[in-house]
């Protein structure tokens, strides 16, 4: 307990993924989770969202949360100031390398269904023939000609295969094109090609530096393999009960699911221990 009577938390930075972690299955944040986050910020910690969603697909959630600080979006490629609605940094995919990588991957797997995230605050998500969108009623722009993909800067490309599961597809990408692009699995049916070396940990480290925070100050919450690098960077990693086995394998703790307020349960315990 501090001299002013407030709790002294062991972590000053609370990093949370969105989908499958802070968000429930219906895309909302529970009152209990809101209250727990409000309590830890009142106790002096900073909450930072670290999501695979690019800014245009994350902004409405941040606004609904009343979130005013920095957010790491686009798998670490974007640092966004939610209060100012301003993009501070953005890393884009080398489109020539991505096109070469896709050719190498499809030579191994056969045809893929594609989607792509355009760069910028208003960046569209383009979806090609056969691509199944898994993230709810969010705006997408269909395309028919693959040449349209390369006409403007991209954050990432999404790929789907009719037969290979997500983990098999990601392993194939790493084997045949891992020297050209990064690859991660961020949700069911969501395999992403990224700028080489880009991870959530990279984006979180940039944002944390702006906040004067270090890995030792950080507790991170997540549910998918794209959260593995973030857990490696943070002092303490908490996987949700619904998390992918690869993330549970590197977590310091497994909490309840996103449906059962797993984040709130951990934060409430930390607050109680610090009181």
Image (cartoon, rainbow, N blue to C red):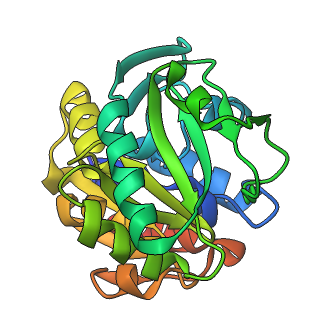
Nearest to the observer: residue 123 or residue 208:
123
Using the rendered view, name the quadrant where residue 141 is placed. Answer: top right
* Horizontal relation, residue 162 to residue 211: left or right: right
Q: Is residue 62 visible?
A: no
For the point 39% across and 41% down, which residue is it? 99
Residue 74 in picture, x, y percent from top left: 46, 40
Q: From the viewer's side, name the closer residue of 234 and 170.
A: 170
Q: Nearer the viewer, residue 242 or 194?
A: 194
Q: Is residue 12 visible?
A: yes
Q: Quadrant of residue 227?
A: bottom left
* Quadrant position of the C terminus in the picture: bottom left
Picture coordinates of residue 254, whole percent (x, y): 43, 85
Residue located at (57% from left, 18% from top): 121
Residue at figure coordinates x 25%, y 37% from the top left? 208
Nearest the eye: 182 or 106: 106
Which quadrant does the N terminus fall into? bottom left
Image height of 250 relative to 160, above or below = below
Identity of the residue drawn at 23% across and 60% down: 178
Q: Position of residue 257 (x, y in %)?
A: 61, 79
Compared to residue 107, the image places residue 162 above or below, namely: below
Single out the residue that lies furthest toward the front. Answer: 107
Residue 17 horizontal/vertical position (percent): 49, 56
> Left or right: where does residue 113 sit relative to residue 2?
right
> So how many labels did they put on this image?
0
């Amino acid at each position: 307990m501090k001299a002013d009577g407030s709790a002294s938390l062991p972590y000053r930075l609370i990093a949370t993924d969105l989908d499958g972690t802070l968000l429930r299955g219906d895309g909302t944040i529970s009152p209990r989770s809101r209250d727990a986050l409000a309590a830890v910020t009142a106790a002096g910690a900073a909450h930072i969202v670290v999501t695979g969603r690019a800014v245009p697909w994350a902004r409405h959630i941040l606004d609904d949360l009343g979130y005013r600080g920095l957010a790491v979006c686009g798998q670490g490629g974007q640092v966004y100031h939610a209060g100012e609605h301003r993009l501070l940094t953005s890393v884009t995919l080398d489109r020539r390398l991505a096109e070469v990588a896709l050719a190498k991957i499809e030579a191994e797997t056969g045809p893929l269904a594609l989607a792509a995230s355009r760069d910028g605050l208003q960046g569209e998500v383009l979806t090609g023939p056969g691509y199944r969108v898994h993230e709810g009623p969010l705006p997408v722009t269909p395309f028919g000609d693959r040449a349209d993909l390369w006409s403007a800067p991209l954050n990432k490309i999404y790929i789907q295969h009719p037969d290979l599961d997500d983990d098999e597809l990601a392993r194939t990408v790493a084997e045949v094109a891992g020297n050209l692009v990064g690859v991660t699995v961020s949700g069911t049916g969501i395999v992403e090609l990224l700028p080489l070396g880009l991870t959530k940990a990279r984006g979180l480290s940039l944002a944390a530096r702006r906040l004067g925070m270090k890995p030792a100050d950080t507790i991170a919450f997540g549910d998918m393999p794209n959260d593995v690098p973030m857990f490696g960077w943070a002092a303490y990693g908490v996987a949700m009960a619904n998390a992918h086995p690869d993330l549970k394998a590197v977590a310091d703790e497994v909490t309840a699911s996103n449906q059962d307020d797993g984040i709130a349960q951990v934060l409430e315990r930390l607050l109680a221990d610090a009181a």
